[in-house]
């Protein structure tokens, strides 16, 4: 007995691969046209082909991650830090802020702790 959902929706198995190919093609074209429109004029770089643009798109995907859809994962990674912050007293929060300001915002400001290693 064949699954009725598959029987009714066989067209999805033909349309989905075509949609994926069209999506990839449009992404490559967009990158190519944006590159060829902006970078040769601004920086004097050479124009690129469609395949180079597609390779650049894949390289950016590898280096910088996905194009979205994983927002819940990021919020989960901040959970322990957020919980720690919530458990701090107002005095501990102010001390933490002062320490961060002295370390990162104004390196010449006096601090209770030094950044130098002995």
Image: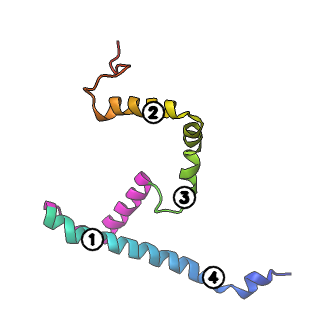
Q: Could you tell me residue 20's position as x and y percent?
A: 51, 75
Q: Are marks 4 and 2 in contact (CB under 8 Å)?
A: no
Q: Nearer the viewer, mark 1 or mark 2?
A: 2
Residue on which the image places disc 1: 34
67 left or right of 89 in image:
left
Q: Could you tell me residue 55's position as x and y percent?
A: 36, 62
Q: Label 3's element?
A: loop
Q: Quadrant of the C terminus?
A: top left
Which span of residues is magenta-colored? 43-64
In primary-sequence order, the first of circles 1 and 3 is: 1
Is residue 21 in sight in this rendering? yes
Q: Quadrant of the N terminus?
A: bottom right
Q: CA distance from mark 2 to mark 3?
A: 33 Å
Residue on which the image places disc 3: 70
Residue on which the image places disc 2: 94
76 left or right of 1 in image:
left
Q: Nearer the viewer, mark 2 or mark 3?
A: 2
């Amino acid at each position: 007995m064949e699954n009725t959902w598959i029987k009714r929706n066989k067209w999805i198995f033909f349309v989905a691969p075509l949609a994926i190919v069209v999506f990839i093609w449009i992404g490559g074209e967009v990158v190519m046209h944006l590159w060829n429109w902006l970078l040769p004029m601004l920086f004097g770089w050479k124009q690129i082909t469609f395949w180079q643009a597609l390779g650049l798109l894949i390289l950016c995907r590898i280096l910088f991650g996905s194009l979205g859809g994983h927002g819940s994962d990021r919020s989960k990674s901040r959970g322990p830090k957020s919980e720690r912050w919530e458990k701090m007293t107002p005095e501990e929060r102010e001390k933490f802020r002062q320490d961060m300001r002295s370390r990162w915002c104004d390196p010449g400001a006096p601090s209770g702790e030094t950044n130098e290693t002995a």
